[in-house]
Amino acid sequence: MSPELNNDSKSVVDSAVETLEVAPGKVVEQHVVELKQTTSRRVGTGTAIVVIGLIVAVVLGLSAGSHSAKFDLNGSNPGISVPTFSLPSAALIIACGVVIILLGVAQILRGFSKRALRWVGIGAGVLFLVAFLIWAGSEGKQAVQVGSLLQQTLFLATPLILGSMAGVMCEKTGVINVAIEGQMLFGAFAGALFGTIAGSYFGLIAAVVIGCLAGALLAVFAIKFTVNQVILGVVINAFALGLTGYLYDAVMANNGNGTNQPSVFSPIKIPGLGDLPVVGSLLFNQTIITYLMYVIVVVIDVMLLRSRWGLRTRAVGEHPKAADTVGINVLRLRYKNVIIGGGIAGLAGAALTIGSVGQFNKNMTSGQGFIALAALIFGRWTPRGALGASLFFGFASALQVALSLLATPVKIDSNLLQMLPYLATIFAVAGLVGRVRAPAADGEPYVKGE
């Protein structure tokens, strides 16, 4: 290297040092510049929104009945009732469609930011659902039971929310949890068995404990023995299905009254809050499992963003080697989070037995663990997103029952309604409201020292 180059390099360093000395304590601000959407992506997303608006305005608006749609916001056992009200059908449906079309046109012409586009997608979805409910009740023969629909949505979404929170606990720390289905099945079985023998609250504890044991099984093979985590999850699901099926035949089938008749949790009405109109009976007159779900969602969301544990969890999920170099015990943290996630999934299983039907049946989860996993992906691996996605799945399931009781302008096959949340998930993951990205180290085993 030439002396001139050395001198030049030294002068650059010196000038940098001098600059720092001239301005001591100067705060350097970093601005994150968001990349603009490509033209094809902007136009494609906007066109999709416009198409949804046209479906609302033309298909639903023109086929709506001539009567006003009646709505009842009161659920079961309301504290303060809200009077039933009517809305003009065709005009309001067309107005919702026009607003959606305008949002799509704005996206095509200018394009929204990534965060704004997410809210635009949510707004367009809400307008579509409002227009659809107005269309469903546009014959005016029966009131649309919105309160009961929302209560059924929360009831059906509770195990999905808990299952997706179990996925958040595991995958934020870098372990893929495909075994949510099996952990829920174990929890459902333990909740029914021990709930019958010793009472519902003991069954609830047993479901959480057996879920933790299932989580520990996943943790040992995934973390210690570095088994492929997707295959491991499938194996645990098959193991849970076979074992609970065998135990059901051996223990419950011939002695249902003594082993498979747990008492179901009754709703607990919170004084004052439970008497509020609309939201009172919806949110504050629920079972202990639903209240626990509220607490779990809030705690995970707050702790992930505002605690040392949350910072370490996210660091391990993104770059475990870097986390290890600053003193974080990567393997211990993964063990802890996966076991806790298994306990939450066991609680989700208990919601299906002692929180719902009051008995256990073979394969009673029926794929809800996989739906919870889909909600986790739909929600971008965040607690709030997973909560919203789970509620959406629950709403789609509850809507089938609501529509079967209404005289809609056009009869809809319930099988078609079952497709809607899955189609929406495909569109979302494909890029309708932005790309999804798992934690960088998700599914990657970590061996210390490599």
Image: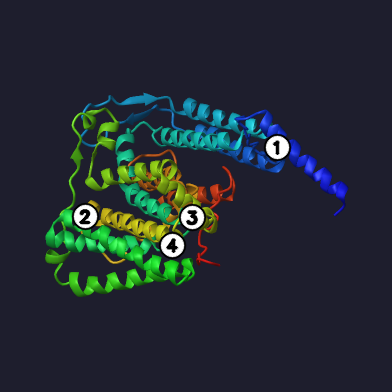
Q: Name the residue nearer the viewer: 328 or 117.
A: 328
- Residue 426, given in percent of the width and then of the height, sits at 54, 51
Name the residue rendered at 61%, 41% in the picture: 48
In the image, which is nearer the foreground, mark 4 or mark 2?
4
Compare marks 4 and 3 and give the one earlier in the sequence: 3
Name the residue rendered at 43%, 25% in the picture: 88
The residue under label 4 is: 331
Q: Amino acid at mark 1?
A: Val
The residue under label 1 is: 17
Q: Amino acid at mark 3?
A: Val
Q: Which element carries disc 1, helix, strand or loop?
A: helix
In the image, which is nearer the foreground, mark 1 or mark 3?
1
- Tell me, for residue 354, which label it has, or none: 2
Compare marks 4 and 2 and give the one earlier in the sequence: 4
The residue under label 3 is: 316
Q: Amino acid at mark 2?
A: Ile
Q: Amino acid at mark 4?
A: Leu
- Residue 315, given in percent of the width and then of the height, sits at 50, 51
Name the residue rendered at 63%, 33% in the picture: 28
